[in-house]
């Protein structure tokens, strides 16, 4: 089947059922809860499981729709996994950058010396509160 025909099928299905990605993610959450898993089954894996189900159906009588559905599920799974991987790579890179960025040293009072430590300590604790009583004149 042509890519255009598969694209048309995907568009029709989306109008009928809503967002493919969102539905696969919801199904993954539901299946995970039913199976008592600690983490959700990713949406792309749900789509891959549907591909497997469609392939099992091919053991019976030939039906073009089964192959079309399998092709679309596989295509959508590929797109979803690429997006998930790109997001994971992005966050992994950000975490690595954060870990590799030198942090400014925080000096202890001992490192500052007694004279400077007292001044820093007093400066850090100086808070200007509004006066409860008027100034005496």
Image (tube, grey):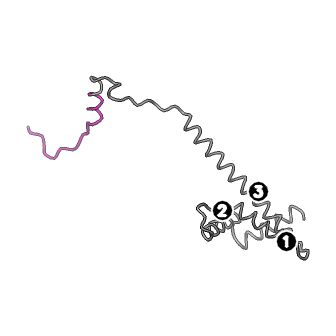
- In the image, taking residue 35 as reference, residue 125 lies left or right, namely left
Check the image and report above or below for 92 versus 65: above
Mark 2 highlights which residue? 41
Query: Which residue is at a point 78% across and 64% down the rendered structure image?
Result: 73
Q: Quadrant of residue 15?
A: bottom right
Kindly state the secondary structure of the residue where label 2 is placed.
loop
Kindly state the secondary structure of the residue where label 3 is placed.
helix
Residue 21 image offset from top left, x and y in percent: 69, 63
The answer to the question of whether label 1 and label 3 lie on touching residues, with beta carbons closer than 8 A, is: no
Q: Is 21 a magenta residue? A: no
Q: Is 129 a magenta residue? A: yes
Residue 47 image offset from top left, x and y in percent: 74, 64
Query: Which residue is at a point 79% across and 70% down the rendered structure image?
Result: 53
Task: Please tell me the numbered disc located at residue 66.
Answer: 1
- In the image, taking residue 123 as reference, residue 31 lies left or right, namely right
Which span of residues is magenta-colored? Answer: 118-136
């Amino acid at each position: 089947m042509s890519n255009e025909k598969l694209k048309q099928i995907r568009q029709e299905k989306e109008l009928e059922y809503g967002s493919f990605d969102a539905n696969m993610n919801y199904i993954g959450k539901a299946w995970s809860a039913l199976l008592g898993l600690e983490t959700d089954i990713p949406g792309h894996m749900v789509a891959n499981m549907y591909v497997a189900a469609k392939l099992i159906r091919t053991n019976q009588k030939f039906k073009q729709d089964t192959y079309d559905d399998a092709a679309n599920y596989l295509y959508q799974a590929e797109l979803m996994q690429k997006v998930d991987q790109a997001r994971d790579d992005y966050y992994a890179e950000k975490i690595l950058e954060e870990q590799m960025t030198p942090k400014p040293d925080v000096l202890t009072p001992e490192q500052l010396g007694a004279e400077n430590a007292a001044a820093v300590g007093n400066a850090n604790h100086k808070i200007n509160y509004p006066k409860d009583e008027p100034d005496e004149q």
